[in-house]
Image (spheres, rainbow, N blue to C red):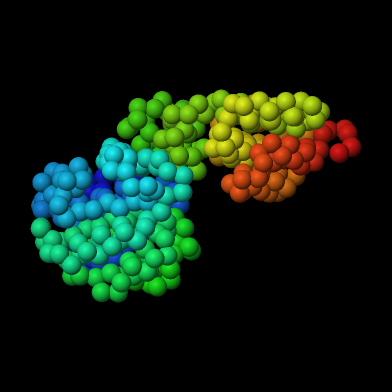
Amino acid sequence: MSFSDVIAQHRAKGILSRAIANERVSHAYLFSGPPGVGKEALAIEFAKALYCTGAGEKPCDACSSCRRIRSFQHPDFRFIFPSSAKNVEEERAVLDSVMANPYSRRKPWATPTIGIEQIREIRHTSTLRPMEGRRVVILAEADKMTIPAANSLLKILEEPPATMYLILTASQVNSMLPTILSRCQEIRLSPLPDNEMEWTLIEKKEVEPLRAQLISRVSQGSYTRALEWLDESYSERRENVIGFLRCCLKDVKSQIELVEQWLREYDKKIIKDILNLALLWFRDAMILTAAPLSENLVNIDQLETVEKFVGAFESIDFEKAFTEIENSVHMIDRNVQINLILIVLMIKLRQTLKLKGRQK
Ligand SMILES: [Zn+2]
């Protein structure tokens, strides 16, 4: 089957396959959608399909063109991505990671951008005749273009050469120039369904079925996140969540101790992971409160613990809990002091939990 390296996204694959079959391919596409759903994987498969010389469905994955795209050795194919200081070795390592698995491209820089010199290079090559009939350029995370880069790209989009195909990918479409958006055919990718992600983890990563189910649910539609969770100790993070919630009910001294311990042991990303898992924990608790026999829980293997949690309180203000946790995650992103954020969050969460038989 074609596009077999892309998980789910059947609608998008259908549109692109038909465009190729009917020879009605646009010169500029924008693959949009949340992080980790396979925008870059689909872009690479589509590039293969554009060059594929195999008979039948494209890409065939067997012809010389398909194989050269797969190994990034096709002379007319380019994969551009945001980077920081020009470092050929680092950039090579990033491309290697995409080649190995387009769902887990390495991102070694803190705030990388696509700069004007990267677009100038595309503009320059766009004036040259491609070696093999057409040129395909993938611009990954096009929403990370600087303003000069975006303006320069616009010049290409205004009059794209007949032999050139641009595939942009972006998760923050709102931050892109409307003039660029209006010149691209947008194809929206959706979060991956749990069952397809689960199947992929079992088939391709040989993950045990129960763990695959857990990781799929906790990854919320992002296969990239699922791959990260495979490496990280998910159970330990969840223990952190349970510990954090217990601590909300304790005295200030214990709360400060917990926060100090976290700051010693964990970086910002891990703390955000824990808070995001806490969101899922509250979500499960809310589902259980509404329907005691639900199969939709993320923490399916911890049914008893979630039940106990729900049972311990007369009521839980879920809306407030969601808002407070989400606010805290945003504040961590905005570099507010983490110890303050966590202490305040514990106090706020304490207010959302009404213990049985006691005043709030
Ligand atoms: Zn092929």
User: The C terminus appears in which quarter of the rendering?
Assistant: top right
Q: Residue at the spot x=42%, y=43% of the render?
A: 109
Residue 122, above or below 256: below
Say how many tags the image has.
0
Q: Which image quadrant for residue 297?
A: top right
Residue 228 percent location from the top left of the image: 44, 35
Q: Residue at x 80, y 30 (%)?
A: 252
Please give left or right for residue 311 compared with residue 98 in the image: right
Q: Is residue 211 visible?
A: yes
Near-viewer residue (270 or 233): 270
Left or right of 211, for residue 104: left
Up-down: is 222 above or below 250?
Answer: below
Residue at 22% from the left image edge and 49% from the top image edge: 2
Which residue is at the front of the view, 236 or 270? Answer: 270
- Would residue 115 appear left or right of 332 to someone viewing this image? left
Residue 245, image quadrant = top right
Extreme residue toward the right, this view: 359
- Percent x, y for residue 242? 66, 28
Q: Nearer the viewer, residue 211 or 250?
A: 250
Residue 289 visible somewhere in the drawing: no
Query: Residue drawn 58% across and 46% down?
Result: 333
